[in-house]
Amino acid sequence: MMRKKVKLAYITNNAARKAMYKKRKMGLIKEVSELRTLCNVDACAIIYSPDDSQPEVYPSPLGAVRVLAKFKNMTEKKHIKKMRDQESFLQQCIAKVNEELENRRKKNREKEITKLLLKGLVAPSSLQDLSLPDLNGLSSLIDLYLKDIDQRMEKLSLGQTQEEDCKPPTVAVQVEAATTAECPSEFDDQHAGGGATAATGPGI
């Protein structure tokens, strides 16, 4: 079952706020414990509550002091290497959102120009009232399509050339058949009259 999204806002009801604090505190301590166990890192949590006189410390006050002392003994370069305050975190989030917004605007603009191009193909007169930015966008889109067509034609032409080069050479052999009319055989000469012929010689 999908968990309901929690609205990040101050809870005005005291009972509900205290219940949420207790629930979130236990969840945070559990996450820190898992981080220490699974990743083998030094971590501690110090949680202040307006309803408690003493803060909640994990894993223990001595353990928290040891982790904080280790952190303070680090060099300043290591301190600020991966440290972020609220301002830098918000700036990073804003930059990410602005980048996503710019990408969406670009995609929407491309869809609008493509729609204008298709509309112009159906009704060319609709292109007469376009503004200069729309005309520039159409020109860029048409150039892009023409470039793509040229690349495809070049690939097809190169593929056909390679296919023709790979074909084995063919040898044409012409055979002329001799007809009886042009080259009569001796048998036909002897039996042309339909009877036998007698051979004569000097001894007969």
Image (spheres, rainbow, N blue to C red):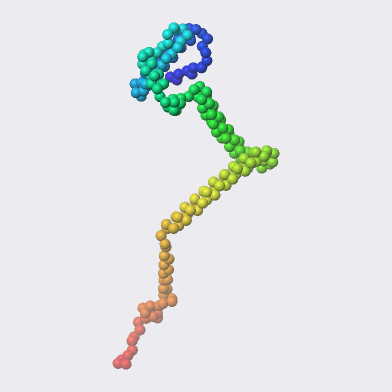
- Total labels: the figure holds 0
- Write down the quadrant of residue 199 in the picture: bottom left
Q: Nearer the viewer, residue 126 or 173?
A: 126
Q: Is residue 75 left or right of residue 133?
A: left
Residue 142 sits above or below residue 204 on the image: above
**Residue at x 55% of width, y 33% of height:** 103
Q: Residue furthest bottom?
A: 202
Q: Nearer the viewer, residue 161 or 171?
A: 161
Q: Residue furthest left?
A: 203
- The image position of residue 167, as x and y in percent, is 42, 58
In the rendered image, the quadrant that contains the N terminus is top left
**Residue at x 52% of width, y 9% of height:** 12
**Residue at x 37% of width, y 18% of height:** 66
Q: Nearer the viewer, residue 76 or 91?
A: 76
- The image position of residue 198, as x and y in percent, is 34, 85
In the rendered image, the quadrant that contains the C terminus is bottom left
Q: Is residue 122 visible?
A: no
Q: Is residue 202 visible?
A: yes
Q: Nearer the viewer, residue 99 or 153?
A: 99
Q: Is residue 73 left or right of residue 122?
A: left
**Residue at x 57% of width, y 44% of height:** 144
